[in-house]
Image (cartoon, grey):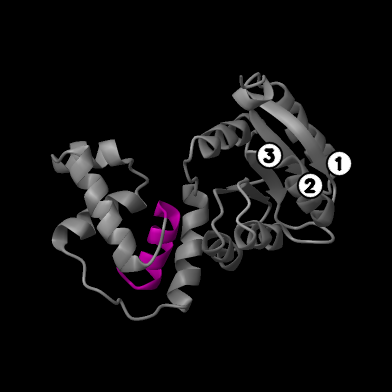
Amino acid sequence: MADRRNKRTTVVVADDHPLYREAVVRAVRSRPDFELVAEADDGRSALDAIRSEAPDVAVLDVEMPGMRGVEILAVVKRDALTTKVVLLSAHLEGETVFQAVQCGVAAYISKASPSARICDTIAAVARGEIILPAEVTTGLAEAIQRTQRPSGPALTPREREVLSLLAEGCSAPQMARRLHLSTATIKSHLKTLYEKLGVNDRAAAVAEAMRRGLLE
């Protein structure tokens, strides 16, 4: 039988600023659906905690001594660890966001976000969602445009419609309602779209489409 821990989202929090980390930790502990399993004040300790505790979600500051958040994310991806990573940053530079998306970040949000929003993001990521708020996407688009490459395989008009709605953050059911199609048909279009773009998830699809000039 699953224990209590398995019924809750396990979380690691890492930030080298004690007061900020304490605020996030306090917010996580206030949620009955979360369980804080470790906290860290530097990148290497954060990675050690991710390896030892295998949390559902790790909330990491982008800039930490020892290892940066994006470097930890790259190791998580390389080693196929199951932890989903939420990156927090005081500065939403496009290049860093772009690197994070390439490495499979689950969410990238501002450190200025209220604690409740951070917790809601953790919950969404635990459900399998990918969170890239509007304040992040402008810089991301600019970074992608600087590394733009040929568009590759042509997309059908319907695939372009799906891609546009994907960029708006619509879910498959929402796309189905907007386009008057079944959810199964939308999922089929998404599968084909991912294959054409050579990606595996929606955030990477949007990033790749921007880089190829398929989205404005």
Q: Main secondary structure of the magenta part?
A: helix
Residue drawn 35% across and 66% down? 209
Q: Which residues are magenta?
A: 201-216
Between the C-alphas of marks 1 and 2, the distance is 7 Å
Q: Is label 3 in a helix, a strand or a loop?
A: loop
Amino acid at pointer 1: Pro
Disc 1: which residue: 18
Along the polypeptide, which appears first: circle 3 or circle 1? 1
User: In the figure, is residue 44 to the left or right of 109?
Assistant: right
- Does residue 203 belong to the magenta stretch? yes
Q: Position of residue 2 (x, y in %)?
A: 62, 22
Q: Position of residue 214 (x, y in %)?
A: 30, 68
Q: Is label 1 in a helix, a strand or a loop?
A: helix
Residue drawn 64% across and 34% down? 114
Along the polypeptide, which appears first: circle 3 or circle 2? 2
Say which of marks 3 and 2 sits in front. Answer: 3
- In this view, 178 is above or below 161: above
Q: Is label 2 in a helix, a strand or a loop?
A: loop
Amino acid at pointer 3: Pro
- The label on residue 55 is 3
Q: Position of residue 159 (x, y in %)?
A: 21, 58
Q: Are marks 3 and 1 in contact (CB under 8 Å)?
A: no
User: In the figure, is residue 146 to the left or right of 158?
Assistant: right
Disc 2: which residue: 15
